[in-house]
Amino acid sequence: PPPPSFPPPSSTPAQMMSTTPQPEGATAARSSSSRRKSRTKKRVLSIQSHVVHGYVGNKSAVFPLQLLGFDVDVINSVQFSNHTGYPKRWEGDVLDGDQLRRILEGLERNGLLRDLGHVLTGYIGSASFARVICDVVRTVRGRARFEDDVDGDGDVDEDKGDDGDADGGRRS
């Protein structure tokens, strides 16, 4: 039998796991506007815990999101040896609000928060950490255009919201 073919290095995890082969250059056929809108909708900032042993927080969220076609940027709110429910405790570090703010400032300076469509949070260990998360959520909401591929044709359409208005149901 022929050797298995591997996806090109530029493939997304969802393309790698797809049972339908993607023709070469399939994504390049979309207009740049559709690509940008699609990329915005599919980018997630996940701010959650991380454990070396086990599957909680970012360790359990990232792979399924990638399989669904999301590009996930990860910030670990904690780095622990194991889940805190183990009887002989755990070891590790907790990110505080100032550290989180510095990480987000680096992302912002490089334009890496610009195309986010979603923020996913998990363990929040302090009020200062929660305040920084609120700030980034406000930033993302302020920039986000609510868009969706409602008809499944691969083109991103504006979300009409529950009331059918192009503003997604929000009132000015």
Image (cartoon, rainbow, N blue to C red):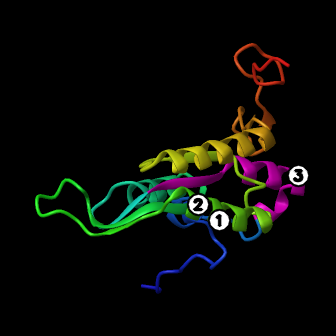
Using the rendered view, name the quadrant where residue 171 is placed: top right
> Helix, strand, or loop for circle 1?
helix
SS assignment at label 3: helix
Residue identifier under label 2: 98
Is there a contact, CB below 8 Å, between mark 1 and mark 2? yes
Q: Residue at x 31, y 59 (%)?
A: 55
Give the foreground label among 3 and 1.
Answer: 1
Residue projecting furthest to the top: 163
Q: Nearer the viewer, residue 54 or 172?
A: 172
Q: Amino acid at mark 1?
A: Arg
Image quarter hosting the N terminus = bottom left
Please identify the quadrant where the C terminus is shown. top right
Dot 3: few (<14), some (14–19), or many (≥20) neighbours within 10 Å? few
- The crowding category of the residue bearing disc 1, from other C-alpha atoms within 10 Å (few below 14, some 14 to 19, many at least 20), is few
First to last magenta residue range: 26-48
Callouts 3 and 1 close, C-beta under 8 Å: no
Residue 59, visible in the rendered structure: yes
Mark 2 and mark 3 residues within 8 Å of each other at the beta carbon: no
Alpha-carbon span between mark 3 and mark 1: 31 Å
Question: Is residue 28 a member of the stretch shown in magenta?
Answer: yes
Residue type highlighted by circle 2: Asp
Residue identifier under label 1: 102
Amino acid tagged 3: Ser
Residue 69: in sight, yes or no?
A: no
- Could you say where residue 162 lies in the image, as x and y percent from the top left? 70, 16
**Is residue 6 shown left or right of residue 38?**
left
Give me the disc on residue 33.
Answer: 3
User: Distance from label 1 to label 2 (Cα)?
Assistant: 6 Å
User: Mark 2 or 3 closer to N-term?
Assistant: 3
Left or right: residue 41 versus residue 35 is: left
